[in-house]
């Protein structure tokens, strides 16, 4: 009777709306954008900044590192780069691109 309980998914208890979030990765999130530096490009999570999380400013397709530092500072840039892991499971701020 596998289909009798809609909340039970394998070995985990899942609410119906959370299945998409649990299967999603950071790479598919709209807050995960490439940060363009002088020598390299790295993905960063803009959900760490309230400016983008609240919707006060649109999330850009890419962002220069100098602009990010001007908006939030170096510490916030390091935090955003460390948070974004394109292949890992998305966090609670996941919002699909679109």
Image (cartoon, rainbow, N blue to C red):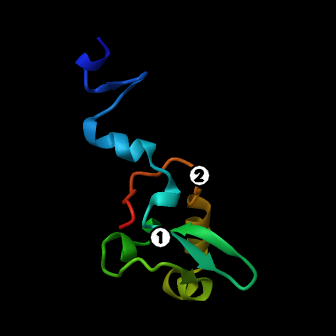
Image height of 39 relative to 18, above or below:
below
Left or right side of 55 for 69: right
Q: Name the residue that disc number 1 marks.
A: 46
Residue 86 in the image: x percent, y percent?
A: 58, 57
Q: What element carries label 1?
A: helix
So how many labels did they put on this image? 2
Left or right side of 49 for 41: right
Residue for point 59% across, 77% down: 35
Q: Please, which residue is most extreme toward the top here?
A: 1
Q: Are marks 2 and 1 in contact (CB under 8 Å)?
A: no
Asked whether 7 or 44 is in front, the reply is 7
Mark 1: few, some, or many residues within 10 Å (few <14, many ≥20)? many
Asked whether 52 or 86 is in front, the reply is 86
Task: Name the quarter where the C terminus is drawn.
Answer: bottom left
Residue 84 in the image: x percent, y percent?
A: 56, 60
Left or right side of 33 for 36: right
Q: Please, which residue is most extreme toward the right here?
A: 39
Residue 45 in the image: x percent, y percent?
A: 51, 66
> Marks 2 and 1, Cα distance to the nearest angstrom?
17 Å
Image height of 15 relative to 29, above or below:
above
Residue for point 31% across, 71% down: 54
Mark 2: few, some, or many residues within 10 Å (few <14, many ≥20)? few
Question: Image quadrant of residue 1?
Answer: top left
Q: Name the residue that disc number 2 marks.
A: 87
In this rendering, the label closer to the viewer, 2 or 1: 2
Residue 47 in the image: x percent, y percent?
A: 43, 66
Left or right side of 44 for 48: left
Residue for point 30% across, 80% down: 56
Residue for point 68% across, 82% down: 37
Asked whether 92 or 10 is in front, the reply is 10
Q: Earlier in the sequence, mark 2 or mark 1?
A: 1
Q: What element carries label 2?
A: loop
């Amino acid at each position: 009777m596998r289909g009798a309980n809609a909340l039970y998914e394998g070995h985990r208890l899942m609410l119906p709306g959370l299945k998409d979030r649990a299967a999603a990765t950071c790479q598919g999130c709209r807050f995960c954008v490439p940060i363009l530096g002088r020598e390299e490009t790295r993905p960063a999570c803009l959900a760490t900044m309230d400016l983008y999380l609240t919707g006060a400013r649109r999330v850009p397709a890419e962002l220069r590192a100098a602009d990010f530092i001007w908006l939030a500072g170096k510490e916030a840039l390091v935090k955003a780069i460390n948070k974004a892991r394109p292949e890992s499971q998305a966090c609670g701020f996941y919002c699909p691109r679109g």
